[in-house]
Image (cartoon, grey):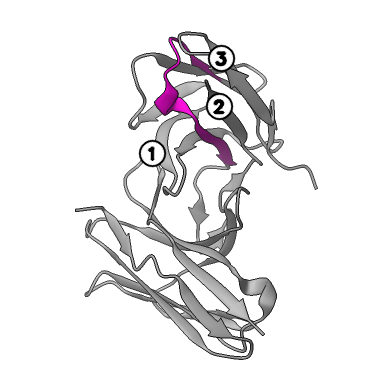
Amino acid sequence: AAGVIQSPRHLIKEKRETATLKCYPIPRHDTVYWYQQGPGQDPQFLISFYEKMQSDKGSIPDRFSAQQFSDYHSELNMSSLELGDSALYFCASSLQPPLDRGLNYGYTFGSGTRLTVV
Amino acid sequence: RKEVEQDPGPFNVPEGATVAFNCTYSNSASQSFFWYRQDCRKEPKLLMSVYSSGNEDGRFTAQLNRASQYISLLIRDSKLSDSATYLCVVVTGTASKLTFGTGTRLQVTL
């Protein structure tokens, strides 16, 4: 079965550079979520999109922006990178509503992009 | 205080043991609850949903106590392959974003 595809798997950037992370959700999933997981930390919610519109915003820095395109893939753009941005970035997709009459559609995560800022 | 709290462990148990993890959440309006499993440097994977009536999936049993805002996961007959970090996850609000606990690390040994 198709899963959530993220690219690239690994990325190394220098401070003050920019990076773009891509996420391709499971076909027919209409919602995409971005999470950041630092070393030894739990995943922190950054931002989500439903039907190409931003649906919620978490602890996403102003230096970051994201969007969801007409084919439902999403991109996370990160500018003026800092050492502290080094982390695993996960994308998850789901079909809204995630729980419907007791059925659990759940959330499926991609394998993540490991960003290292040097 | 974090919205979702877990004992970080690690829990070191021998193969075949029964182990239980607990999780508390602070937002009484939370409506959905899950346990996710995360292996080192991998993405979180859904283990099971948690319902008030309690639910079981093989060796795994999950329980939710809304009055106490408490979630539990019981693993029976632990296997080496159960070694991982177990994340308690709560969904609150209309946007349905997931809020993760810090995770409980389990190490099953021979």
Q: Residues within 10 Å of mark 2 (few under 14, many from 20)?
A: some
Q: Are marks 2 and 3 on the same chain?
A: yes
Residue extent of the magenta highlight: A76-93
Tell me: residue A89, above or below residue B88: above
Relative to B74, is B94 on the left or the right? left
Q: Quadrant of residue B57?
A: bottom right
- The answer to whether residue A63 is left or right of residue A114 is left
Q: CA–CA distance between discs 2 and 3?
A: 11 Å
- Are the residues tagged 1 and 3 within 8 Å (C-beta)? no
Q: Residue at label 3?
A: A19
Examine the structure image and report whether residue B25 is included in the region drawn in magenta: no
Q: Residue at x 31, y 57 (%)?
A: B4
Answer whether residue A30 is visible to the viewer in this image: yes
Read off the residue under disc 1.
B95
Q: Nearer the viewer, residue B46 or B32?
A: B46
Left or right: residue B67 versus residue A86 is left
Chain letter of disc 2? A
Q: Amino acid at mark 1?
A: Ala
Labels 1, 2: front one: 2
Look at the image and tell me in which quarter the C terminus of chain B lies: bottom right
Q: Position of residue B64 (x, y in %)?
A: 37, 74
Front label number (1 vs 3): 3
What amino acid type should be assigned to the residue bearing mark 3? Ala
Secondary structure of residue under mark 3: strand
Element on which disc 2 rests: strand
The residue nearer to you, when weighing A53 against A80, is A80
**Residue A37: % across, % down:** 47, 40
Numbered mark located on residue A116 in the image: 2
Q: Observer-nearest residue: A12 or A35?
A: A12
SS type, badge 1? loop
